[in-house]
Amino acid sequence: MSKELIYKICLFGDRNVGKTSLTQAGIQKKKAKPPICIDIAIKNFTINSSKITLQIWNLRSGPQFQFIFPIFMRGVSGGIFMYDIANYSSIKNVEKWLTLFNDSLSNEKKKIPILMVGGKLDLHKERMISRRSAKKISKKYKIVKNFECSSKTGENVDKIFEFLTRSIIKFEGYV
């Protein structure tokens, strides 16, 4: 039986870690920017004969925008915390971002899958965050899975969105 499923996912993390690049990599269409604090993109694909539409909400990371996180988190089905593998300071704020994200979900009263994604894999020679270190951090914060990707080359981009979608489907009890 095929279904049409629509999921809202949010990307969050420090500035310049690759959130916008990941959002734009491989999407079919981009919606107009609502306010200046968010970009919304649409990604369509099929999983097990179900048509999936992902609304990818890329939240700006400046402190001036954090007060509106709870408004934009309404109806979210999954999240991606993003860091830059070549910038150690980008992963140091993981606890702050996860707290902000989870506090924004407190009204939703549901558990959702969150991935941790290391961006800019094409800069692997400048790596400052090892895979082992990232996995340790993701385990500490009960992140569903840790990925690395390159939006520039497309490496793992589709895998990330497909894995997150499968995780959402599992969390919602469709599997």
Image (cartoon, rainbow, N blue to C red):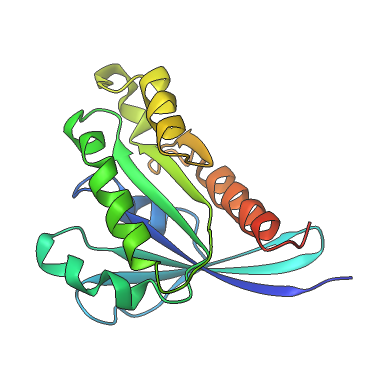
Q: Place residue 52 in its image quadrant.
A: bottom right
Residue 131 in view in this figure:
yes
Whole-percent x and y of residue 127? 28, 21
> Residue shown at 43%/38% (left/top)?
153
Question: Which of the 4 quarters of the picture holds residue 30?
Answer: bottom left
Q: Is residue 2 left or right of residue 20?
A: right
Task: Work out which quarter of the rendered image holds the N terminus and state it.
Answer: bottom right
Q: Residue at x 62, y 51 (%)?
A: 162
Residue 13 visible somewhere in the drawing? no
Identified at 30% across, 39% down, the residue is 83
**Which residue sits furthest right?**
1
In the image, residue 55 sits, relative to residue 130, either above or below, namely: below
Q: Residue at x 62, y 58 (%)?
A: 168
Image quarter hosting the C terminus = bottom right
Q: How many marks?
A: 0
86 over 40 or under it: above or below: above
Percent position of residue 78, x then y? 50, 59
- Residue 14 in the figure: left or right of residue 154: left
Q: Position of residue 58 (x, y in %)?
A: 34, 63
Picture coordinates of residue 48, whole percent (x, y): 81, 58
